[in-house]
Amino acid sequence: MNTKNRKVLTIVILLIFIISFLFSGCNLLQRRYEKVVTKNYTVSSSGKNILKIDNDNGNIKIVNNSKDSNIYVRADIKLHLTKRELKSENYENMASIKIDSSDNEIKITSYYTIEKDIIKFGRKSININYTIEVPRHLDLEVENINGDIVIRDNDGNIRISNINGDAELKSLTGKIFAELKNGKIKCELDSTKGINLSAVNGKVDFRIGENFTGNFDMQTVNGKIKRETVNFSSIVSDKKSFKGSIGSTDTKVLIETVNGNITITKRRDI
């Protein structure tokens, strides 16, 4: 194929691409209206050891249920629809939640039933925001994208992974593993069986109670390590790393950041 024919073919392909975009992507330019569809679920935790959550586009908040042994799930599906989509009344089928309680685990998964827009613009504006009440003994495993994670008042082991969102962890006593990309970690604990916090493009703020004990190993690539109102022993430190102990314990506290500060503060209870 000569150069002239290549140029003609390139122009034809480009025109086809532009026309396809204008027809299939025109919805991107239309005004959208917010619609929230709320779904509630109750799941027994009897015989279950772990709750797993897999979500894409939305926030996840997990708190303690002290009333009974059930898991209460509220899913707020937030849709931004064109007038045509709103009138069709099929919008409730654009997203769904699957709950699988087989074996010794419960798994909650978000599904989107609409296709992605052309040129990978991402899903149309749909978010699924969860508020979940769980018995405090359950282990938790949470994977999320494009949203924040909040977990409070739990005694199980916690493992979270989050991309493009923050994490708040408070009043947890089990082992904790948290890995974030493009988000900050805020953690407040009185005790732990072990903790590993990792943030890329985000900071870590760690507040500890008066009786907290642990062997700290902290490292940062592009950031600072700040210790406020906390007394450590057996200190080994330089500009980008710090090791030190609080109390007598074998509990490990590992904290790493890339492009973010690490701040350790002792909470002063009134």
Image (tube, rainbow, N blue to C red):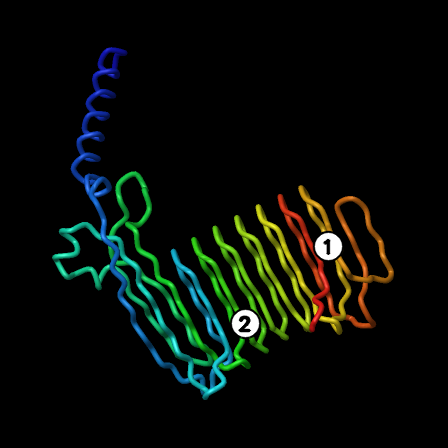
Kindly indicate the quadrant of the structure image that contains residue 114. Answer: bottom left
- Secondary element at tag 2: strand
| Callout in the foreground (1, 2) | 2
What type is the residue that disc 1 sits on? Answer: Met
Q: Position of residue 32 (x, y in %)?
A: 23, 49
Image-quadrant location for residue 254: bottom right
**Residue 59 drawn above or below residue 71:** above
Residue underneath mark 2:
152
The quarter of the picture where the C terminus appears is bottom right
**Residue at image point 42% right, 64% down:** 54
Report the amino acid beneath label 2: Arg
The residue pinned by badge 1 equals 218
Judged from this view, the residue extending furthest toward the front is: 270
Give x and y (percent) for residue 260. Answer: 63, 46
Q: Quadrant of residue 101?
A: bottom left
Apparent side of residue 87 relative to residue 215 in the rendered image (left or right): left
Across and down, in percent, residue 214 comes to 76, 67
Tag 1's secondary structure? strand
Quarter occupied by the N terminus = top left
Mark 1 → mark 2, Cα distance in angstroms = 24 Å
In x, y percent, where is residue 218? 73, 54
- The residue at the point 68 percent across, 52 percent down is 262
Q: Is the Cβ of the residue at disc 1 closer than 8 Å to that at disc 2? A: no
Please name the residue shown 82% across and 70% down the image.
247
Is the residue 104 above or below the residue 165 in the image?
Answer: below
* Mark 2 burial class by Cα count in 10 Å: few <14, some 14-19, many 20+: some
Of 149 and 178, the residue lying toward us: 149
Asked if 77 appears above or below 125 in the picture, the reply is below
Numbered tag placed on residue 32 in the rendering: none
Looking at marks 1 and 2 on the same chain, the residue that comes earlier in the sequence is marked by 2
Judge by depth and name the residue closer to the eye, 33 or 100.
Answer: 33
Give neighbour class at mark 1: few <14, some 14-19, many 20+ (Cα, 10 Å). Answer: many
